[in-house]
Image: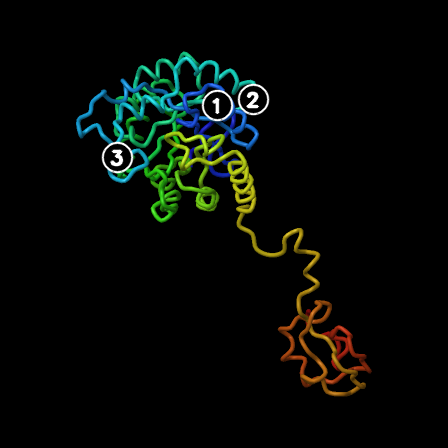
């Protein structure tokens, strides 16, 4: 696949997984809480922190009409879109302050813009990349504007058909984007593991020849870790300082200790992927001797016949390979052999006429 580069590091097959801590609404309207999440992300091993850049007025309109009221069994049922976005938005005046703190911490800091004005604002902040939310993957003018910045962009694909993903990628490329990555996403909050369909990750990579990762809204860390084995190059997960502090996203977010455990599991999993390899590894070599081999298990006098009673395949592996047992049985001993002796060709009449 075609790798991308973010802040000087390569992202793609064979490179370390890029772990993004999504802050979203977990700051709860408290700047100091946002700073604590930034610091927690760094300490937990995240490579980047992502926020969201919008206002309630750019997302929707203030209306009590049924169209604008949330329902359907979500965490936010009964609320209006305007009220939810008013509560969840990250104040724009925080952006430069949070970015400066992230730079001190040496962690990447970027955002998801939801309109062209937000893109213009983030360009002024000098963010290194952009994320397009799943719900905005059909907003082709927005994708075209982000692509025009020339910066790497990550497209989240929740709810999108293959044709919609293709249209978004084509729009991004036509708009000037040369570094694009995709995230497999299930836009449910929280998302049940049975609807994640991780096998889509390698298929997306094959379809578009792009790095593919996972935007994970499940509870816990199992799904995120499993995504590594399916070839995920990027992993995005919500981070909160404490789920006891209720926010719009806290219910499906990880706390710092859990996020650290996830990062550690992901790093172990990516190390375990290794390469295609058969045979003995470096640390297996010392145990090779504990394979089975042919041993004399009863004293054998010179000229006596080798039989199942006096020759067996047992551990350790100092004798002839077990595959030679059929050829050994019935031959005669060339000299007296004591119990516990590894069997070799020179202990049989006819001498060493085969390779072991």
Residue 82 drawn at (x, y percent) = 27, 23
Q: Identify which residue is drawn at 73% across, 68% down.
A: 318
The residue to which callout 3 is attached is 164
* Upstream in sequence: badge 1 or badge 3: 1
Please tell me whether mark 3 sits on a helix, a strand or a loop. Answer: helix
* Upstream in sequence: badge 2 or badge 3: 2
Residue 55 drawn at (x, y percent) = 32, 18
> On screen, 252 above or below 9?
below
Residue 163 drawn at (x, y percent) = 25, 37
* Circle count: 3
The residue to which callout 2 is attached is 105
Instruction: Give the number of the mark in front: 1 or 3.
Output: 1
Give the left or right position of residue 96, taking residue 316 as reference. left
* Upstream in sequence: badge 2 or badge 1: 1
Residues at badges 2 and 1 in contact (C-beta under 8 Å)?
Answer: no
Q: Quadrant of the C terminus?
A: bottom right
Q: Which of the 4 quarters of the picture holds residue 291?
A: bottom right
> On screen, 73 above or below 172?
below
Q: Quadrant of the N terminus?
A: top left
The residue to which callout 1 is attached is 33
Instruction: Give the number of the mark in front: 2 or 1.
Output: 1
């Amino acid at each position: 696949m075609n790798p991308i580069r973010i802040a000087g590091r390569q992202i793609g097959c064979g490179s370390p997984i890029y772990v993004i801590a999504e802050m979203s609404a977990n700051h709860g309207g408290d700047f100091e809480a946002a700073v604590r999440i930034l610091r927690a992300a760094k300490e937990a091993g995240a490579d980047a922190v992502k926020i969201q850049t919008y206002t309630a007025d750019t997302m929707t309109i203030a209306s009590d009409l049924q169209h604008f009221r949330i329902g359907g069994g979500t965490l936010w049922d009964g609320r209006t879109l305007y009220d939810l976005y008013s509560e969840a938005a990250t104040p724009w005046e925080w952006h430069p302050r949070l970015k400066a703190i992230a730079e001190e911490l040496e962690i990447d800091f970027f955002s998801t813009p939801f309109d062209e004005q937000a893109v213009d604002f983030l360009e002024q902040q000098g963010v290194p990349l952009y994320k397009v939310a799943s719900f905005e993957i059909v907003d082709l003018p927005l994708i075209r504007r982000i692509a025009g910045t020339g910066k790497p962009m990550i497209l989240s694909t929740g709810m999108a058909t293959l044709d919609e993903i293709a249209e978004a990628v084509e729009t991004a490329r036509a708009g000037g984007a040369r570094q694009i990555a995709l995230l497999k996403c299930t836009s449910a909050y929280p998302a049940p593991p049975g609807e994640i369909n991780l096998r889509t990750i390698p298929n997306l990579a094959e379809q578009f020849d792009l790095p593919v990762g996972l935007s994970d809204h499940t509870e816990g860390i199992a799904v995120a870790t499993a995504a590594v084995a399916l070839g995920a190059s990027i992993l995005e997960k919500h981070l909160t300082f404490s789920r006891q502090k209720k926010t719009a996203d806290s219910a499906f977010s990880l706390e710092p200790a859990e996020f650290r455990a996830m990062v550690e599991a992901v790093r172990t999993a990516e190390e375990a992927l290794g390469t295609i390899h058969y045979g003995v590894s470096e640390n297996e070599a010392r145990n090779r001797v504990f394979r089975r081999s042919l041993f004399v298990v009863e004293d054998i006098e010179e000229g006596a016949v080798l039989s199942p009673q006096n020759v067996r395949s047992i551990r350790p592996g100092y004798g002839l390979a077990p595959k030679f047992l059929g050829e050994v049985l019935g031959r005669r001993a060339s000299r007296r052999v004591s119990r516990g002796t590894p069997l070799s060709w020179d202990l049989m009449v006819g001498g060493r006429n085969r390779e072991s």
